[in-house]
Amino acid sequence: MDALLSDICISMSAAPTYLPAHYFKTEDSHGNTKEFNLIDGGVAANNPALVAIGEVSKQIFKQDSDFFPIKPMDYGRFLVISLGTGSSKFEEKYDAQKAKSWGMLDWLLSSGSTPLVDIFTRAIDVATKDNMEKLVNVGVLLLKKPVSRANLETGQMVPTCSETEETNEEALKRFAKLLSDEKKIRQARSPK
């Protein structure tokens, strides 16, 4: 039962209190339907790429023909794309020396601020119509920027070093073609 990528993305970003839950249904070739009532993917899995790798690994161990001839633990054969939401402007507000002695109440309310709430909501914006329009504009601009990766030492996003500077839009189109080609190969191999 293939779900539309748009339904998956809307569901995965439906953060409670910020964006509404998302409903959709899928239908297989026999007319069987399955309904989905979903919210933010982070509620179920904070690292969905790792969950996906685990699920694919299970199928490989079960010798699922869709994954032949990949061997268990052959992670070099996996192709993963991670569409992040960017990084927030970090405001240095709490230091470890003070926080290490905090109790539960200090985490909830400290010096006129709410550290725990601030930490969990720092990167989330208010879902007003104006902000949603701004988010669309940010997305359009990001598509035109060069592909970047997180520098593991600094945590900053840096453009990938390649001979041909590929934009995010070009990389997504290339990845979509890879996925489409892979699906066609699997459908041709699968029994009808």
Image (tube, rainbow, N blue to C red):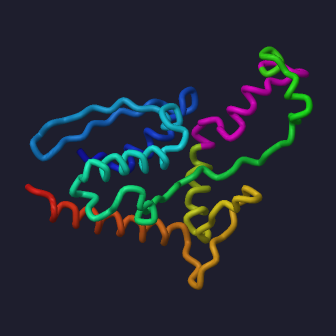
In the rendered image, the quadrant that contains the N terminus is top left
Q: Is residue 121 magenta?
A: yes
In magenta, the rendered stretch is 108-131
Residue nearer the viewer, 152 or 123: 152
Residue 44 % position (x, y)? 48, 33
Residue at 26 percent across and 48 percent down: it is 62
Residue at 62 percent across and 42 percent down: it is 130
Residue 57 % position (x, y)? 37, 50
Residue 128 % position (x, y)? 60, 36
Task: Give left or right: position of 36 versus 110.
Answer: left
Q: Quadrant of residue 115?
A: top right
Residue at 36 percent across and 29 percent down: it is 37
Q: Is residue 126 magenta?
A: yes
In the depicted structure, whether residue 78 falls above or below residue 146: above
Residue at 85 percent across and 28 percent down: it is 100
Furthest-bottom residue in this view: 163
